[in-house]
Image (spheres, rainbow, N blue to C red):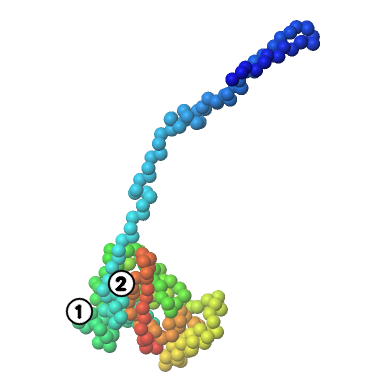
């Protein structure tokens, strides 16, 4: 390949003749030296320590079994209990075997109802709190205890006490007119069940209670697990006698 011609240039200041300098190749851009944050720091920083499985993986909730005396099976449980009455009015089968009909049980006091049974844990393993829900009521009932675990008596007493509470104006206003009519009729049937005039007037003055939301279904039929929520159980009912 022929070489290009050299061009001589006359310097206008010195009249000297010179050839233009050979163009120097473009210098490559300087590569910045790595900083501490890019190379050295990464080599000085220890690798991340993997988190412990004991802190990242929650332990599975314990599987609870309900005491057979209050387990819902579709038939009356061993403890035939009308929640319109306090737990001292328990219906307990005469025989130690599970009763299939509350009518075969005898009515008596807590002493007759076997205090040892009522003091047993409602769940196994024992738990210090239980939450009860029911489709018939817009409230949940939280059963707690001052002892080590919730007993059968604690469950019955908590249900009874919750149902004796008066319905507030806000709670009543949240109901539909149809629901109000049904519950009001249940309230008057319950009050009319008192033969004593003084007691009847006293109940009228107390107003509608949560008990009236059950519309006569006051017979306790046991509890069952509520889905997969640990510690939450569903209360089942049967139509019972007129509440008082």
Between residues 208 and 199, which one lies in front from this camera angle? 208
Between residues 42 and 168, which one lies in front from this camera angle? 42
Q: Is residue 59 left or right of residue 138?
A: left
Q: Secondary structure at mark 1?
A: loop
Identify whether 28 is placed above or below 66.
above
The residue under label 1 is 96
- Quarter of the image where the C terminus is located: bottom left
Q: Residue at x 37, y 69 (%)?
A: 227
| Residue 87 percent across, percent down from the top left | 33, 78
User: Residue 216's image quarter?
Assistant: bottom left
Task: Kindly tell me whether residue 28 is visible in this rendering.
Answer: yes
Task: Kindly tell me whether residue 161 is visible in this rendering.
Answer: no
CA distance for labels 2 and 1: 17 Å
Q: Residue at x 41, y 75 (%)?
A: 134
Between residues 167 and 181, which one lies in front from this camera angle? 181
| Residue 109 percent across, percent down from the top left | 29, 80
Q: Secondary structure at mark 2?
A: helix
Q: Earlier in the sequence, mark 2 or mark 1?
A: 1
Q: Residue at x 71, y 14 (%)?
A: 7
Which mark, by number, is residue 152?
Answer: 2
Which mark, by number, is residue 181?
Answer: none
Q: Residue at x 33, y 80 (%)?
A: 221
């Amino acid at each position: 390949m022929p070489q290009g011609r050299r061009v001589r240039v006359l310097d206008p200041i010195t009249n000297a003749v010179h050839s233009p300098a050979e163009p120097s190749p473009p210098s490559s851009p300087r590569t910045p030296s790595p900083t501490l944050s890019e190379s050295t720091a990464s080599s000085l920083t220890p690798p991340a320590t993997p988190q412990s499985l004991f802190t990242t993986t929650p332990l599975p909730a314990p599987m609870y079994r309900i005491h057979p005396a209050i387990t819902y099976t579709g038939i009356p449980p061993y403890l035939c209990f009308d929640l319109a009455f306090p737990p001292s009015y328990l219906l307990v089968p005469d025989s130690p075997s599970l009763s299939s009909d509350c009518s075969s049980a005898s009515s008596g006091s807590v002493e007759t109802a076997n205090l040892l049974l009522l003091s047993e844990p409602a769940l196994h393993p024992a738990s210090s709190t239980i939450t009860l829900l029911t489709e018939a009521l817009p409230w949940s009932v939280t059963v707690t205890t001052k002892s080590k675990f919730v007993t059968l008596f604690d469950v019955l007493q908590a249900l009874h006490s919750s149902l004796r509470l008066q319905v507030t104006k806000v709670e009543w206003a949240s109901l539909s007119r149809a629901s109000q009519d049904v519950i009001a009729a249940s309230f008057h049937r319950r009050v009319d069940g008192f033969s004593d005039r003084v007691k009847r007037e006293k109940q009228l003055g107390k107003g509608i209670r949560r008990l009236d939301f059950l519309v006569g279904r006051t017979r306790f039929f046991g509890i069952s697990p509520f889905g997969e929520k640990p510690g939450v159980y569903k209360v089942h009912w049967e139509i019972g006698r007129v509440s008082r």
